[in-house]
Amino acid sequence: MTDDIRPEQFAGDELVLAPDQVLLPEGPASGQAVVVADGYFRAVGPREAVLAAHRGSKPIELPGKMIMPGFVDAHHHLTQSFGKALAYGEPSEIFSRIWVPLETVLDSELVYLTAKLAALEALRGGFTTVVDAGTRAVDDTAAIARAAREAGLRCVLGCICNDLGTAPSGTDRSAILQRARDHLERWRDDALVHPSLAISIPEAASDEMLRDVSAMAARAGAIFQTHVNEHLVAVERSLVQRGLRPLEHLSHAGALGSHVLIAHSTLITPSELIILRDTDTAVAYCPVASQWKGNAVAPALTMSELGIRFGIGTDGTRSDGFRLMDAAEACQRLAFGIAVGDFSAGAGWLWLDQATAGGAAAAGLGHRTGTIEPGKAADFLILDIDIPELTPSWDLGWELVRLGNRDQIIAAFVGGKLRLWRGWPLDWDARALLSDVRERAAAAVAKAPIHRIHPTSGEHRARTMAKRSSALTQKT
Ligand SMILES: [Zn+2]
């Protein structure tokens, strides 16, 4: 394929971009131009007016292209990228059999490698921001921050503050709270890394810790993250131990609020939906996690109608913004829409909006990213829309959700800087990273006390072949 645009065109201090379409907060618009300078969108508006006001810079014509905000992954685990196919198709609570064993064998260098691989995958899938829920690796979060910054990915970085169970940080409350304060302070003014505090699941912390950590995050203008109501076994355990469902437990501890982002909320009662609404707590809806390992699908359409804020998260499954939107819609349709004749299932626009602006707001970054508006960080994608699948085009929002594909992403910019060009970075050696990962991952995984239940594809095939041959022997 011959490129009509080249990466060198985007090297200037001020970029005046003139694409066919810009995805604005109110929807796709033609005849617009966008100015990027010092890492921010400086102007967005009718092409002639913007070009006239910026005569000093030669406009970059982008025929057949669209500029859209980068996707926001509202829930990720950057230190789980060595797991991939080891982890899914498994009975619930894979964190206890796979993720915790894997993460706890990672040293600082392996944390850096796995996080950088995950950051690269995220950018390739069109995500310019990811929300990391925190790692259980013994090392501190600096290696993850280094990986995200080097890759050029915006990252809300969780620091886990569990004070019960086998927390790597120990169970000394005052030491954990000091570590949390240090984390908030360390990343407070970073351009790409935004600190956050987390508790893995409510039962991993005392009520005091849930309340204090959540309050500390709120005071610092950071978000507090936790996972709730994902699996039946966890809901039952909470009911037996506390007489409360996990989300009720958080509410009881006084840990909810508009600075809180909870992952999953798939098994949620009407009264818990009301708790979310009344506390203005945000949710990370993780549809692919439901497809691959879940007990249920979060009622995201109902949340949307109730005014509950939510973003869409991968939960470390598959970093592909387009397939994530498709899954978000398909899961609502299959789990809720079909049964009641809701053929729209949010239509296209809801999912595009939630995968960008909604995710940014849920991540506590609504003022900084998620839309193409003057004053926001220039986190955006250049998409090729001159393709058969979008021809003819009748409703670009709908089409991006159902027909869009990551191979349309020509460039990904974060903070105004070109980070990937056609899926690969230009300023660091991603192939060398893959080679390092191949060399190191097998030993790390072999060392981890992972307990898998489900057979691999090869084992499954061998079992099927054995069954067939035994059936044949019996026949003859
Ligand atoms: Zn998670």
Image (tube, rainbow, N blue to C red):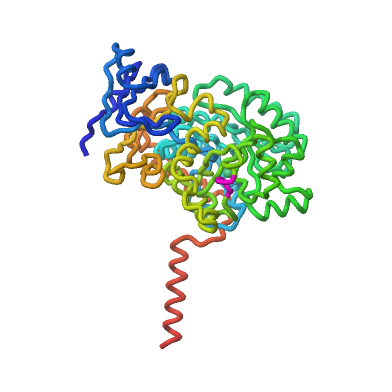
The answer to whether residue 225 is above or below residue 445 is: above
| Left or right, 142 with reference to 273 | left
Query: Looking at the image, which is closer to me, 33 or 312?
Result: 33
Location of residue 431 in the rendering, given as x and y in whole percent from the top left corner: 36, 38
Q: Which of the 4 image quadrants contains residue 384?
A: top left
The answer to whether residue 160 is above or below residue 178 is: below
Q: Residue furthest left?
A: 2
Q: Regarding ligand 1, which quadrant of the image does it lie in?
A: top right
Q: Which of the 4 image quadrants contains residue 419?
A: top left
Dividing the image into 4 quarters, which one contains the C terminus?
A: bottom left
One can see residue 113 in this view: no
Location of residue 299 in the rendering, given as x and y in whole percent from the top left corner: 58, 48
Location of residue 403 in the rendering, given as x and y in whole percent from the top left corner: 36, 46
| Left or right, 402 with reference to 19 | right
Q: Residue furthest top?
A: 56
Location of residue 282 in the rendering, given as x and y in whole percent from the top left corner: 61, 37
Q: Which residues are magenta?
A: 298-302
Say which residue appears at 41% left-offset and 44% top-offset.
401
Q: Residue furthest bottom?
A: 476
Say which residue appears at 47% left-offset and 64% top-offset.
459
Query: Looking at the image, which is closer to me, 304 or 209?
Result: 304
